[in-house]
Amino acid sequence: MEKKPTFGGPRRPGGARPKPGQRPRPGDRRNDPYAINERIRAQEVRLVGDNVKPGIYPIDKARRLAASMQLDLIEISPTAEPPVCRILDYQKFLYQQKKRAKEQKQKAAKVVVKEIRFGPQTDDHDYNFKLKHAIGFLQDGCKVKAHVFFRGRSILFKDQGEVLLLRFANDLEEYGKLETMPVLEGKRMIIMLAPLKPKKEKETKPASESKGDHSEKKGDAPKSEEPVSRPASDDEVANAE
């Protein structure tokens, strides 16, 4: 009698099927970032949050309190003594954590560092060319890392390299702030410049509000000048007669 070929169904794209003991159980939370409920091993925990009275509770009492609210006991700081827990809906808590991490990632500004290299005896033409590039980098919000490279016996001119870098920083004082003084690292002397924040324009006061302006208020009539009396001269007395 011929044996019928056994057909186990199509193979999975990931390879062989996992063994029954290797299959993830439903509700398995071993890979969760936080321990919750029965997975919390501490004998007592510190509860924090708005929906409970803050304090230290035995673990059984904290679990019963969370169950009475139909929420989860979440261990948010396992390294504290005792561990710090909150009573919240676990899925909602994970969603809030992911949302917060995403917002912080978006707010984190990426710092771009541009390098400018000099020789210990750079001429003025090359210096001005690189100075112009550095101004553009700082105006774009990038940091500038300028260094003088000493090759061979040119390390004897390290004083010239320091003077060059300080001159470079001084010429850029309107665009960048010197973060580090010239430092010799191996064969390079380095400085770091950070871009200056744009200054807020001060509100200009109108001329009528400037100091020393004593303009008359509206509705006030101008004061009339009183005639000044003086004694009549001899010619005026003769004419009157």
Image (cartoon, rainbow, N blue to C red):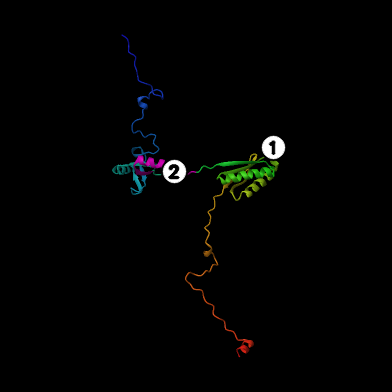
Residue 222 falls left or right of residue 123: left
In front of the other: 163 or 129? 129
Q: Main secondary structure of the magenta part?
A: helix
* Category of crowding for the residue at label 1, using alpha-carbon neighbours closer than 10 angstroms: few (below 14), some (14–19), many (at least 20): few
Front residue of 120 and 227? 227
**Residue tagged 2:** 103
Q: Quadrant of residue 158?
A: top right
Residues tagged 2 and 1 counted as in contact (Cβ below 8 A) = no
Q: Position of residue 208 (x, y in %)?
A: 52, 65
Q: Name the residue tied to disc 1.
A: 152
**Can residue 191 be seen in the rendering of this structure?**
no
Residue 94 part of the magenta segment: yes
Callout 2 crowding tier (Cα within 10 Å): few <14, some 14–19, many ≥20 = few
For numbered disc 2, what is the local secondary structure?
A: helix
Residue 77 on image: x %, y %: 40, 43
- Name the outermost residue toward the top: 1
Which region shows up in magenta? 84-108
Q: Position of residue 236 (x, y in %)?
A: 62, 87
